[in-house]
Amino acid sequence: MGYLKRVLAITVMIFVAGCGARMARQLGEPIVKPADTKPTTEQKADENTGKTARTLSGTLTLTDDAKVDLSTITQPVILIFAAYTCGECKEEAKEISAFFTQKTAQPSNMKIFSVLAGSGKELALKWKAKNGVTWPMAYDENNEAFVKFCPPPPGEMLSKTPCTVTFNPEKDETPKMTIGRSTIEHLEAETGPWKF
């Protein structure tokens, strides 16, 4: 019973935080972009060249039960954290989906993942289908990845959704976090030009 109360409390906090992010933008406050979200990167040597590259650290559990070790990805990465009831999260997913549909493909030179915070596999599958997500979808039932990659802004106690984390190992020392809905232009600017 204690577990269910905790999950319910976390879900309510995510919902309230998402609404707070939307209201802040309506009031004209800037999008928050903390410079440092350590410890989410690590140095990794390429087996072929011996060159050291910075990668994200952490593991995602996808809705197909696959585990993704982020430290193995050497391309730019986009992690889009959403909450089940977050309206802006749904709008963002549908916008990205429409863009990929128009291009008839997803970029080959970056990796994108949506992560449903505070939800299990069944809700993540439902959210994915309902919002047209065609890229890998992960679920973060205990909010471990969400809190790690999207810590609360300075002076606040709760993380907010949508929260997008971008990381380009070619130019970034640490991941960049954006609170609020990201545009295609913003995502591409952060990860570099996309190739289809």
Image (cartoon, rainbow, N blue to C red):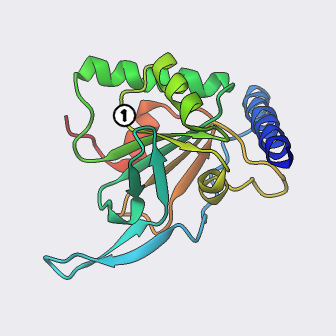
Q: Indicate left or right for 120 with 114 as reference.
A: right
Pointer 1: residues within 10 angstroms few (<14), some, or many (20+)?
some
* Residue that protrudes farthest toward the bottom in the picture: 50
* Residue that protrudes farthest toward the front in the picture: 1
154 versus 123 height, above or below? below
Residue 106 on image: x %, y % = 27, 33
Residue 20 on image: x %, y % = 80, 34
Q: Residue at x 73, y 29 (%)?
A: 22
Residue 87 on image: x %, y % = 65, 21
Residues 65 and 118: in front is: 65
Rendered-image quadrant of the N terminus: top right
Quarter of the image for residue 151 reads bottom right
Looking at the rendered structure, the secondary structure element under dot 1 is loop
Q: Residue at x 47, y 59 (%)?
A: 59
Quarter of the image for residue 16 reads top right
Marker count (numbered): 1
Residues 39 and 61: in front is: 61
Q: Indicate left or right for 108 with 59 as reference.
A: left
Q: Residue at x 30, y 62 (%)?
A: 74
Q: Indicate left or right for 188 with 104 as reference.
A: right
* Residue that protrudes farthest toward the left in the picture: 48
Q: Residue at x 28, y 43 (%)?
A: 193
Quarter of the image for residue 84 reads top right
Rendered-image quadrant of the C terminus: top left
Residue type, mark 1 in image:
Trp
Residues 74 and 5: in front is: 5
55 versus 123 height, above or below? below
Q: Which residue is mark 1?
A: 135
